[in-house]
Amino acid sequence: MPVELPVAFKLALELAFSMLSFVLRNPMRKATHFSRSTLNPYLTVLLTFLATITKHAETLSIMERSIPWHDLARFFATIPHDIFAAQGLDIPATGSEWWAMLTSGYAPPLSEDWCLRGMEWISCKVFECGYWKSGEERRVEVEILDMEEGSQLTDGIIEDEDNEEDGYSHRESLCGETSKRWSRLVRCAVSLSTVVDGLTWLEGTCEWRVEGVLEAKVMHWLEEDCHERKEEEWR
């Protein structure tokens, strides 16, 4: 039986996932014409959160209607192939897990991870023990607030954007923090595909689909939303 959500909570969910849908369609940020593109950190925060809470079936059932599944699948399909290869995802799995936790081998933390500090989630396989140690001597939260967008300039170098594959250049995908963000996102994507029936990843490829049970649900929800809009217009 579907859980009846409080109106305020339902509106908050719709707003959060509406923002996620927009960012999935516009994932790269460029503060100025002379700065390099960066991957929006909102993606890593939200998808780290989603990859964790959706492991709980009851929580997934409450939130699944609000999650933009098709936008997720389209975005996951644009993750650079070299990121898949670096994570060992360019070949089918042999039955063992690819990584112990979402953050295994990727200390120090991403800048936006400090927004999630306090949520150790060790039992949920997110932040490995000692993950925060490498940044404890710094006031990282303050550094992030003081950071100036557009400070990473191209030094007058004009990069050829015509050779980008799926909208992201090879150089961007391998660039420091951007590379670590892509790596987190691909891990989140694979994690979601293992717990959400119908969000399908074709192992060893960069192909993602929404199908089966999930596709049927999404189509049903779209029809309900359309019917509700028509009723509202009639009223």
Image (tube, rainbow, N blue to C red):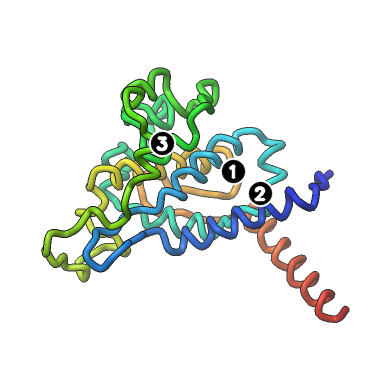
Residue at image position (54%, 21%) is 123
Callouts 2 and 1 close, C-beta under 8 Å: yes
Report x, y in % for residue 13.
66, 51
Report x, y in % for residue 168.
29, 60
3 vs 1, front mark:
3
Residue 166: image quadrant is: bottom left
Report x, y in % for residue 228.
80, 70
Q: Amino acid at mark 2?
A: Glu
Q: Residues within 10 Å of mark 2 (few under 14, many from 20)?
A: some
* N-terminal-most mark, 2 or 3: 2
Q: Amino acid at mark 1?
A: Val
In the rendered structure, find residue 196 and report the number of the disc placed on it.
Answer: 1
In the rendered structure, find residue 17 and report the number of the disc placed on it.
Answer: none
Please determine whether, in this image, residue 155 is positioned above or below residue 175.
below
Secondary structure under tag 2 reads loop
Q: Is residue 146 left or right of residue 159?
A: right
Give the labeled residue for mark 2: 64
Front-most of 102 and 178? 178
In the rendered structure, find residue 141 and report the number of the disc placed on it.
Answer: 3
Residue at image position (39%, 24%) is 132
